[in-house]
Image (tube, rainbow, N blue to C red):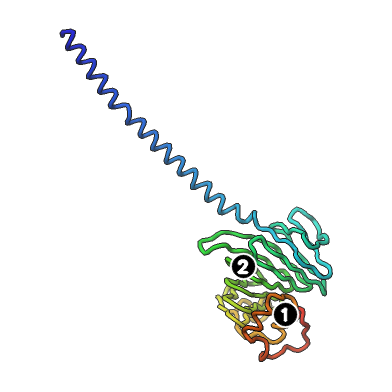
């Protein structure tokens, strides 16, 4: 082979190797991009599933009488006042003749009736928006929803509000939970099924004795229900006035105006 042929052969090999080199580089670049995309997706999912609950707190804006809270890292209740922040999984309790207003970081307002106890459970993002969860152990809470939805876990069921104003009352004297839908879209749910509620309607959940876990029953809100709203939740005044509610419904006997009656 002549020198010129050898040079041509070497040149051909060099050109061939230079054309082959980009292929592994392209593959490596694509794999790196895929890896980065996977990491980004995982981080987003972690943020949405875990971060939203950690961000939920409640700030006490108003108190009347004795109001106490128990933070998740505390073993007993302590006195709370205006400006006190209730952490996630914390509990708030009112004494007899005591009330409180708790503003959640989501914007929703929770009005607490006397002799009540509830736990701030969760605040999660779902495909249907933000869902806040409370657990009511005893007494009554009034919800003024400011976006998303809110579920109240009660004995044997769940009271839910998807818009506006709802109250849940545990009434031990009759083993019943009353879900009052002052305005908007609410529901009462147990193992037997779901009951949709709207303006001026009240759902009844039985949690012990005869009728346990039967399908939630519907009735209308009575005068005492509206009086309780007016006494505990000033935000309800315009709604009640605009809808003309509370004028015709019957009054329950032997009830007070502070959430002590069904």
Provide the residue designation for mark 1: 230
Q: Position of residue 230 (x, y in %)?
A: 72, 80
Examine the rendered structure and indicate whether residue 15 appears above or below residue 241.
above
Q: Is residue 64 left or right of residue 40?
A: right
- Residue at horizontal 61 percent and vertical 78 percent from the top: 183
Near mark 1 (Cα within 10 A), the count class, few <14, some 14-19 or many ≥20, is: some
Q: Position of residue 157 (x, y in %)?
A: 62, 72
Q: Quadrant of residue 70?
A: bottom right
Provide the residue designation for mark 2: 146
Examine the rendered structure and indicate whether residue 27 appears above or below residue 93.
above
Q: Is residue 198 left or right of residue 251?
A: left
- Residue at horizontal 23 percent and vertical 17 percent from the top: 11
Q: Residue furthest left?
A: 1
Near mark 2 (Cα within 10 A), the count class, few <14, some 14-19 or many ≥20, is: some
Q: Position of residue 181 (x, y in %)?
A: 62, 78
At numbered mark 2, what does the secondary structure look like: helix, strand or loop?
loop
């Amino acid at each position: 082979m002549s020198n010129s042929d050898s040079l041509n052969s070497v040149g051909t090999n060099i050109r061939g190797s230079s054309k082959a080199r980009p292929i592994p580089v392209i593959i490596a670049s694509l794999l790196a991009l895929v890896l980065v995309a996977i990491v980004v997706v995982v981080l987003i999912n972690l943020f949405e599933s875990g971060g939203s609950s950690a961000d939920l707190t409640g700030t006490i804006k108003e108190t009347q009488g004795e109001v106490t809270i128990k933070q998740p890292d505390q073993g007993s209740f302590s006195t709370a006042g205006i400006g006190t922040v209730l952490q996630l999984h914390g509990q708030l309790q009112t004494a007899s003749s005591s009330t409180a207003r708790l503003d959640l970081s989501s914007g929703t307002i929770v009005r607490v009736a006397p002799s009540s106890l509830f736990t701030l459970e969760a605040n999660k993002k779902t495909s249907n928006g933000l869902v806040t969860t409370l657990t009511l152990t005893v007494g009554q809470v009034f919800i003024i929803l400011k976006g998303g939805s809110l579920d109240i876990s009660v004995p044997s069921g769940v009271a839910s509000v998807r818009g506006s104003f709802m109250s849940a009352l545990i009434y031990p004297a009759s083993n019943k939970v009353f879900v009052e839908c002052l305005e908007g879209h609410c529901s009462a749910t147990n193992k037997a099924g779901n009951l949709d509620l709207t303006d001026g309607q009240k759902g009844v959940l039985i949690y012990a004795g005869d009728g346990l876990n039967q399908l939630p029953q519907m009735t209308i809100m009575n005068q005492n229900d509206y009086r309780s709203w007016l006494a505990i939740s000033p935000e309800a005044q315009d709604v009640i006035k605009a809808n003309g509610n509370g004028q015709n419904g019957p009054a329950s006997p032997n009830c007070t105006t502070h959430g002590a009656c069904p």
